[in-house]
Image: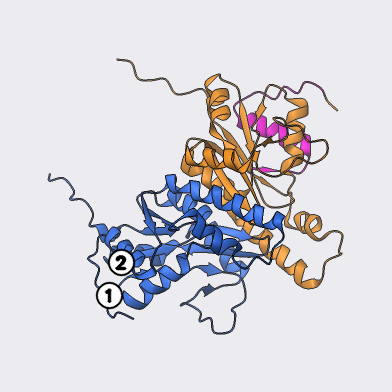
Chain colours: A blue, B orange
Amino acid sequence: MPATPPAPESSRLTVLAGPTAVGKGTVSADIRARYPDIWLSVSATTRQPRPGEVDGVHYLFVGPDRFADMVANSELLEWAVVHGRNSYGTPRGPVQEKLDAGVATLLEIDLQGARQVRATMPEARFVFLAPPSWEELERRLVGRGTEGPEERERRLATAKVEMAAASEFDHVIVNDDVQRAADELVSVMGLAPHPVAGR
Amino acid sequence: MPATPPAPESSRLTVLAGPTAVGKGTVSADIRARYPDIWLSVSATTRQPRPGEVDGVHYLFVGPDRFADMVANSELLEWAVVHGRNSYGTPRGPVQEKLDAGVATLLEIDLQGARQVRATMPEARFVFLAPPSWEELERRLVGRGTEGPEERERRLATAKVEMAAASEFDHVIVNDDVQRAADELVSVMGLAPHPVAGR
């Protein structure tokens, strides 16, 4: 019996995470705009939609009963209750369907979520988005200077810990330029960079 | 060559988690008081000690640089930045040392932490502490009735989701009585209940 051929790279979920304020959302948005053939995972949440948010596009807005069902039925790759208030999670079904269909799939998530995905989908590709330098991250975190010295200290301490998490990841991409970082992410996903339009 | 004998039950870490306000801390404290031969894992944290807290007993109090080193060197079974402020984590080394020495080891942790431990130590035993009833959990969560209806609704929605997480665990123990629940936990850990003193 012939050995099973290795799965194509596109059948692996790519998880993008990184420290606070590194620009994960901006890189994801750039992928969404310039690489429409890459599917971005949509989180489920129990919080109320904000103005302009579209169900199924920005989030899957679900009630707590439905969310609890998803948890009970192991339908989530990861989930969390944030600040003891609202629940957020990544539905496994849509991700698996896209992967099975050979669609390149990206999940942008926080560091704790990424570590949970490692338990439920260890074969995923874990990518850490890093700032160009510590000084640049510091600038983004405390740039406006409206916080007291204690809050500033806390943010930098947190950033230091979050930066150390890079060691948990398979790849590190430096976010020196959003489009360049997005193109590198596309390469890491096993695709040739092929933006639909420079903007 | 003879097959490797199965590891004794005491060489498996036991993880105790459950919904908010179910009484994890009380059950852990009862184990600490009545079962001194069970070792309770001590979390590392970057927050300042509170009055009465003893370094190495209640927490390992470390600076952010040391905590970042622990993250970078994969010395933590799980970790999190809580409310964007302080970092908490479970050092792997002390847990592994106790397990290797055949000491029964218990880790009390939140649900998100438990899901991370599943990635780093999948052979652990995962125990969910459940309330005797939904009504009792509701009573504990909103008992004082000082919150508005919206906050009350949020707490119950969160509890519903957290209760659904029972399906992720190997065992469910009902916390109807603290000593009884603790004794059952000791049994689940593969030990005969053997309290040092009734209190």
Q: Relative to A37, is A184 above or below?
A: above
Mark 2 burial class by Cα count in 10 Å: few <14, some 14-19, many 20+: many
Q: Residue furthest bottom?
A: A52
Q: Amino acid at mark 2?
A: Asp
Tell me where the magenta segment starts and ends, as one range.
B168-197
Secondary structure, mark 2, is helix
Q: CA distance from mark 2 to mark 1?
A: 8 Å
The image quadrant of residue B171 is top right
**Residue contact at pointers 2 and 1, CB within 8 angstroms:** yes
Question: Which residue is identified by label 1?
Answer: A195
- Along the viewing direction, whichever of B47 and A156 lies nearer the viewer: A156
- Along the viewing direction, whichever of B173 and B114 lies nearer the viewer: B114
What residue lies at 56% left-to-right and 72% top-to-bottom? Answer: A62
On the question of residue B102 being in view, the answer is yes
Mark 1 burial class by Cα count in 10 Å: few <14, some 14-19, many 20+: some
In the image, are marks 2 and 1 on the same chain?
Answer: yes
**Residue A39 position in % (x across, y down):** 35, 70
Protein chain holding label 1: A
Protein chain holding label 2: A
